[in-house]
């Protein structure tokens, strides 16, 4: 039985999970680390809340990818009613259990590789509106490789659903907080991060397009994804520098997949602080602050030839296709 999953660099004897070791990883390896299958998922964070009850449940395809709960958050000074929205990329963060569950083809279809469908965003939109109606602060947990790109989702109006969700957050009459747990990719993540505050786990990533998709568009091959990742500034730490992330949540003892309980508790302390702060805002203050936050995001910079060359010369750790066009994935990644 497979008990744990190991990324290739984790098997390197020089890698010890310290902050210094993580800093030495390539950007693509940091991206891989951000969605390690054993990192805690949204449902693992429900223990931080009281009186948790699911709402707006549905059996529609994709409804499991964004889940919603009414709950209360007890901070140091008060108890705040909240509406929880969370992207759940799979049934569990327990790798042994997940391997067993994914042997069932219906289970694989149900989770859709973690990619939200139009029904996912319909549930998110309805939950935001319900949270506003019940005067609940909106807490959004982000974890996705991107929205579902299939023709079925396009026909189902996924672009409109994403835009509708962005608008709902922008117009929310109650404070909104987004927490990037693992990887927040493409429109699938952007749909849920138009909030009053965006928090992110220390080793998470937040990117407008996956490295593979970026490489395919720019270089017409996915094999330069490592290069695309280096140029794209994909980590949440870089997002903090650029003002699109407001605060990093420490993974205090090391990467979250190694120390999940400590990471969950660290998340509670940071969320509680922001909930206490935003709970003092009036409706007029919320909108003014929201507009001010988004107006200051974005700037241009010019790269030197040396900086461009340093990106292009990075070692590529991506698997190469064999003569038959197949890629052997995750070789020697299990114990």
Image (cartoon, grey):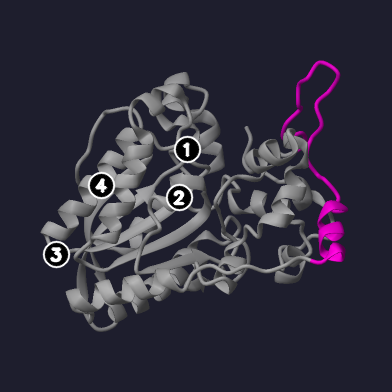
Please identify the dominant SS of the magenta region.
loop
Which mark sits nearer the N-terminus, 1 or 3?
1
Where residue 189 is drawn, which disc sits there? 2
Q: Is residue 330 left or right of residue 205?
A: right
Q: Name the residue under label 1.
A: 114
Query: How far across and how far down the image is residue 156, in percent?
Result: 33, 27
N-terminal label among 1 and 2? 1
Horizontally, residue 7 falls left or right of residue 180, namely: right
Toward the left, the furthest residue is 133
Cα–Cα span, label 1 and label 3 = 30 Å
The range drawn in magenta is 304-332
Looking at the image, is mark 4 or mark 2 earlier in the sequence? 4
- In the picture, the quarter occupied by the N terminus is top right
Is 81 placed left or right of 49 in the picture? left
**Mark 1–mark 4 distance (CA, rounded to whole Å):** 18 Å
Q: Mark 3 points at which residue?
A: 135
Residue 167: x percent and y percent? 29, 53
């Amino acid at each position: 039985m497979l008990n744990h999953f190991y990324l290739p660099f984790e098997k390197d004897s020089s890698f010890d999970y310290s902050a210094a070791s993580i800093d030495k990883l390539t950007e693509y390896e940091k991206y891989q680390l951000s969605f390690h299958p054993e990192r805690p998922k949204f449902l693992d964070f429900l223990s931080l809340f009281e009186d948790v009850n699911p709402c707006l449940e549905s059996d529609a395809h994709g409804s499991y990818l964004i889940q919603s709960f009414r709950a209360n958050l007890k901070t140091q000074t008060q108890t705040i009613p909240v509406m929880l929205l969370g992207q759940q990329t799979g049934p569990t963060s327990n790798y042994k259990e997940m391997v067993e569950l994914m042997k069932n083809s219906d289970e694989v279809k149900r989770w859709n590789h973690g990619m939200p469908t139009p029904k996912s965003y319909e549930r998110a939109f309805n939950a935001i509106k319900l949270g506003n109606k019940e005067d609940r602060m909106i807490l959004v947990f982000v974890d996705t490789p991107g929205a579902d790109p299939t023709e079925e989702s396009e026909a189902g109006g996924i672009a409109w659903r994403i835009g509708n969700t962005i608008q709902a957050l922008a117009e929310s009459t109650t404070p909104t907080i987004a927490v990037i747990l693992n990887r927040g990719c493409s429109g699938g993540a952007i749909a849920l991060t138009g909030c009053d505050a965006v928090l992110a786990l220390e080793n998470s990533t937040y990117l407008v397009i996956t490295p593979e998709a970026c490489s395919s568009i720019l270089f017409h091959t996915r094999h330069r994804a490592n290069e695309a990742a280096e140029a794209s500034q994909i980590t949440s730490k870089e997002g903090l520098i650029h003002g699109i992330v407001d605060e990093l949540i420490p993974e205090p003892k090391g990467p979250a997949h190694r120390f999940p309980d400590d990471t969950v508790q660290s998340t509670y302390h940071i969320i509680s602080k922001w909930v206490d702060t935003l709970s003092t805002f009036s409706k007029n203050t919320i909108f003014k602050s929201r507009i001010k936050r988004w107006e200051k995001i974005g700037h241009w910079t010019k790269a030197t030839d040396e900086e461009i060359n340093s990106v292009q010369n990075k070692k590529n750790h991506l698997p190469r296709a064999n003569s038959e066009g197949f890629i052997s994935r995750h070789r020697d990644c299990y114990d």
